[in-house]
Amino acid sequence: MRKRLLFIGLLVVGAALLSGCELLDQIIAAIPGGGTLGGEVVDVSITYWLVATISEQLVSDGPITSYEGPIGTACQPDGGNYNKATKTFTANWDGGVFSDTYMEVRFNTPEDAIDFFWVRQTEEVWSPQGPWKYVDEFRGYNVHHSYWSADRTVRTYEVVGTAYNGATYDLLTYEKWDNYDEWPSRRHEWVNSHLDIILDPDTRITIRVTYSEAQP
């Protein structure tokens, strides 16, 4: 019986090869676990909360000190472009309080892990203490841990705590300063590089991927 099933299977694949790739793709997609995900990536958001060594200068030309503190950023472009051939999503959201924005997220071949991400933005924020400007940029690789929403239209990839599970980072930019151009002195804080990141149980990097339809 097994030999007969194997023979029939070979005949089906052989017929598909003779009939063209489209029929073969349909057969593979019908096999449980076969083929790539259905639908298209329509939106990606990236948020992160890191602990790092932050350099601080309370006034221009004043002494520079450092402390361990949090860096938190949310990058939400609300749409973008997905290249199915290269498995790459790109977006920007310049306008309003945001400028110099960019996001790139590249998936692996079966689209079940993130091989690469890169995000940046400049944001001007008003607070009771006055206007501030933030510059944030973060780049990393190999984010594998994920889970689906109940309706399987959103897949969330996360790095939580000190268990990075193979994820690595090679670029981190963080700067914050008061935005009073007319003042001769201003508060300024920054990190020097990704090497300033401190392993901490509160670390959370979340990449939320939204699809155009429910996934199998």
Image: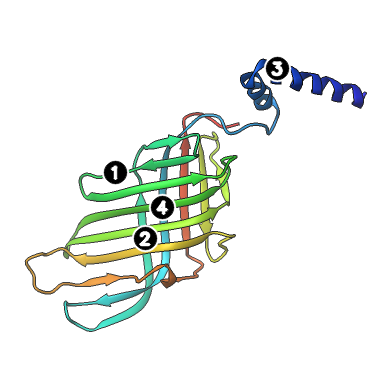
- In the foreground, 96 or 99: 99
Q: Earlier in the sequence, mark 2 or mark 4?
A: 2
Viewer-nearest residue: 94 or 180: 94
Q: Earlier in the sequence, mark 3 or mark 1?
A: 3
Alpha-carbon span between mark 2 and mark 4: 16 Å
Q: Nearer the viewer, mark 2 or mark 4?
A: 4
Marking on residue 72: 2
Mark 2 nearby-residue class (10 Å; few <14, some 14–19, many ≥20): some
Residue 93 shows which numbered tag?
Answer: 1
Amino acid beneath label 4: Trp
Residue drawn at x 56%, y 32% is 215
For the N terminus, give its image quadrant: top right
Residue 134, x across and y down, in percent: 26, 60
Kind of residue indicated by mark 3? Leu
The mark that comes first in sequence, 3 or 4, is 3
| Residue 155 screen position, x and y as percent | 52, 42
The residue tagged 3 is 18
Distance CA(mark 4)–CA(mark 1): 14 Å
Q: Alpha-carbon distance for marks 2 and 1?
A: 18 Å
**Residue found 35% across the figure and 57% down from its top:** 73
What residue is pinned by disc 4? 118
Q: Secondary structure at mark 1?
A: loop
